[in-house]
Amino acid sequence: MSETKRIVILGGGYGGVEAAKKLYKKFKKKKHIEITLIDKNPYHTLMTELHEVAGSRTEQEAVEVSFAKIFGGTSVTVVSDYITSVDFEAKKLQSDSASYEYDHLILGTGGEPEFFGIPGVQENSYTLWSLEDAIRIKERVENRFREAARQADPDKRKRMLTFAIAGAGFTGVELAGELAERRETLCRDYHIDPNEVRIVIIEAMGTVLPSYPDKPRQKAEKYMKKIGLECMLNSPIVGADEEGVSLADGSKLLTDTFIWTAGIQGSEFTARINLTKGKHSKDECSYASAEGIHGMAGCRFDEDERYIVGERGRILVNEYMQSVDYKDVYLVGDMIWFLEGDHVVPQIVETAIQTAEVAVHNLVSDINGGEKKAFKSNYHGNMVSIGGKYGVAHVMGVSMWGFPAMAMKHLVNVHYLFSLAGVNAVWNYLQHEFFRIREKRSIMRGHMAAKLPTYWALPLRVFLGYKWLNEGLKKVMTGWLDPGAGGVFDADPGRVYLPGLTFWGDASGATSATPAEEVSGATSATAAANGGGGDGSWGQPILEESLAIYDWFAATVLSIHPSVAFLAQSGVVIAQVVVGIFLILGLFTIPAALASIAMGVMFIVSGWGNTELWWYLTASLVMLGGAGKGFGLDHTVMPLIKKFWNGTTLAKKTYLYVDEPRLKK
């Protein structure tokens, strides 16, 4: 038996998760390879969407993807723990309560804000580098509006309603856009004049989004001005205190809320591991807490829970993403320092994912033998949203703005989430971004978020069910389920009423009659053989002739033998009855609605359905909104089915569970 190899990945960010998924794919058939992912949280955070939570566009669940979702159908072991140190000689990670031994280690602990040693900035600012940060900003903004609404002092009120954001890069611009949209809601809720509210971006350079080409940058500046954002360019920050932000020109912006988005460096964890750094932080006296390094304004940690961070920085790696100190240690993502040509690799998502791919390839080569691969970046571009309705993008050399840019951003997010946790993660994203969005804050302007209460759909659901049930029972009463004396497997051709059939080997040339002869409810059919049918009072069929696809199916499948056609005919009748019952009871409403749509389409293409089917189809579409969840059995039955399904291995492997997977005890 092969010796067990223990691979430990520290950090569940973009790089760490990518590494774990690729390692599992490489080693899923090798039982002697153990893969463990350790992170302080039980979920992966979508860091690029934190501004949406901070600006209250989405809830925190929108940026959380649980590791149970991601790895539920794999052999990857996920541990929630806070690692305090690593002994690289003993190959052991240590937390306050446990130790974890490894044979191969991948570090992906990310980056954290850099304050550049500017006096007072960390102590008096908020940051946007974690979910906790985003929630703090969200709560702070609403609190300022609430307090301002009852503040009589005009100077204090003005300071409360001034929000300063340091940095006009991606994060700063995206956060400012979200706050601008939220301003409308909060001003309405707290009866504040929007002209009193200032959202100010402070940038040391001479332009916003300095890495962007001129055209999208100009479009961004124009839109930012349109929605009331102020930009103070060429304004380096030299200090901050409780009253506001001091600038290099000697002026001071008075504000109660100062948000820092102007720098990134290696995480505070890099100060606690003995690995060579490629670049050190300029701020060697940052405070940290259990959340790492962040702005301390609004922080709930007491003084004795804060500690000074030592020398931190980005860890030096070679072209294989290996530590230059230990060959069994690989590093990925924001914490690495690697020069590609004359430029250090940027701290962005694409870098994290691509460094993880290289690290995994080379780690697998260490275990299996093989040629190592050097890192070579392949950046495609980036997208910046300015609120939920507008954005700019520069992707593969193409600049976009407005709707196309936002659509591209959503498509990129969907692509990533599908690779992360399949349909489940994508559906969750669409729910938060489109179907549950508040205040019309999406490129669809809230049209997809409009909801119809289930109690309004109740009469329609019951009536639609009654109509299908009535259709089915009419056919039962007129002999559609009677195969004749020969039984099911030797059905009488005269008992088959489906249109367009010529049975193979039928010397008499007997065929079923044309569909327009008789009409029963919403579907017409010949019933002369048994005296069934109606008087045609429901009108003529939608199509004068059946479509070619039905003609082909009728000739090649249904006409094989009368018994085949009879079984299909019986299936139609039974389906009508079952769909009708399910819709009336509100049981399995969505599958029943899909079946209703399928039957309607089938009747139309066969030349068998009349104009009444149009409302059957439209009513069925309404049922897809979950019309059985209220005043229907789905209210009780579906949660039980969901609970069972979410615990199955198949659901976890395919990511087709609903909400969260159920962990079995």
Image (cartoon, rainbow, N blue to C red):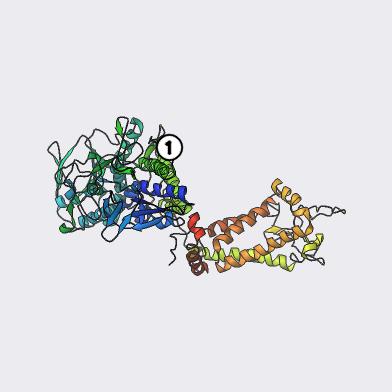
Q: Is residue 612 visible?
A: no
Give SS at disc 1.
loop
Residue 182 or residue 276, whichever sits in front: 276
Residue 331 or residue 399, whichever sits in front: 331
510 relative position to 612: left or right = right
Residue 416 or residue 197, whichever sits in front: 416
Relative vertical location of residue 658 with respect to residue 605 in this rendering, above or below: below
Residue 259 on image: x %, y %:
23, 47
Q: Residues within 10 Å of mark 1 (few under 14, many from 20)?
A: few
Q: Which quadrant is home to the C terminus?
A: bottom left
Q: Amino acid at mark 1?
A: Glu
617 relative position to 99: left or right = right
Residue furthest left as drawn: 250
Residue 525 on image: x %, y %:
74, 58
Query: How many marks can you see?
Result: 1
Residue 612 or residue 305, whichever sits in front: 305
Residue 599 on image: x %, y %:
64, 57
Q: Is residue 130 visible?
A: yes
Residue 201 on image: x %, y %:
24, 41
Relative vertical location of residue 574 with respect to residue 280 in this rendering, above or below: below
Residue furthest front as drawn: 1
Name which quarter of the figure residue 74 lies in. bottom left
Q: Which residue corresponds to mark 1?
A: 371
Residue furthest right as drawn: 508
